[in-house]
Image (cartoon, grey):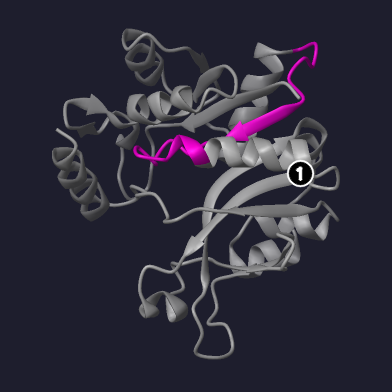
Amino acid sequence: MNPIVLIPARMAATRLPGKPLADIGGVPMVVRVMRQALAAGVGPVVVAAGDPEIVEAVEAAGGQAMATDPDLPSGSDRILAALDRLDPDGRHDAVINLQGDMPFADPAIVRATTRLLAEQPSCDIATIVAPEDTPEDRANPDVVKAVIAGDGRALYFTRSTLYGDQPVLRHVGIYGYRRAALRAFNAAAPSPLERREKLEQLRAMELGLSIWAAPAAAAPISVDSPADLERARQYARTLT
């Protein structure tokens, strides 16, 4: 297997505009994500950038970035556009999509998605799950719950409260795709379940693509709001 890690990033985030370049302990967020991906050591790392200032920041930090159309509708569209330009001959048969808003993602979870693709022939898409943070997660629609079989196959993802007062698994939005699966996913229109739950991974499941999940000890900090950004900055101060 010959994986590549692609990090989609664009400035026009709804809740936190400009977040890829948000300063976290003196380092732009997207650069922190890139460094975590490089530390995983699974393959080349490229930022799929929707804006020239992201390209400039990544290259200034010694990284590689590929400019993509800022109007692309999703991160998966952005990484596929970058992949087709970076690797038109198809040398990379696996693509790890590491979100550009996870500045402290453990390199081990990047390696875990790669390992799932390598070890499970029936796995089209690999992802990560983590234990709930608090019991309040169980009824929080902003927490995506993963329903996982004993062998690691994903059966469903939902924003709804699952039946029973039991701990839930949080879905962590990191994906490892076989290249053909990424192309099939992007070629399909949003599915009924995807539109209902507002979860794009359900499109893959409705297409018949198999998703497997690897466990993480905890969900990484994800920066989607000013409050999240402050939490990330506070965490960065604990590392110095």
Name the amino acid type tagged 1.
Answer: Phe
Above or below: residue 87 compared with residue 168 = above
Q: Is residue 95 magenta?
A: yes
Q: Residues within 10 Å of mark 1 (few under 14, many from 20)?
A: many
Percent position of residue 9, x then y: 45, 31
Residue at the spot of label 1: 185
Q: Which residues are magenta?
A: 88-108
Above or below: residue 142 compared with residue 28 = below
Query: Can residue 185 be seen in the rendering of this structure?
Result: yes
Relative to residue 15, is residue 108 drawn left or right? right
Taking the spot 52% from the left edge, 74% from the top edge, the residue there is: 168
* Quadrant that contains the N terminus: top right
Taking the spot 53% from the left edge, 22% from the top edge, the residue there is: 41
Percent position of residue 219, x then y: 42, 55
* Quadrant that contains the C terminus: top left
Quarter of the image for residue 139 reads bottom left
Above or below: residue 151 compared with residue 52 = below
Count of numbered marks:
1
Quarter of the image for residue 63 reads top left
Taking the spot 21% from the left edge, 51% from the top edge, the residue there is: 231
Which secondary structure class fits the magenta region best? Answer: loop
| Mark 1 element type | helix
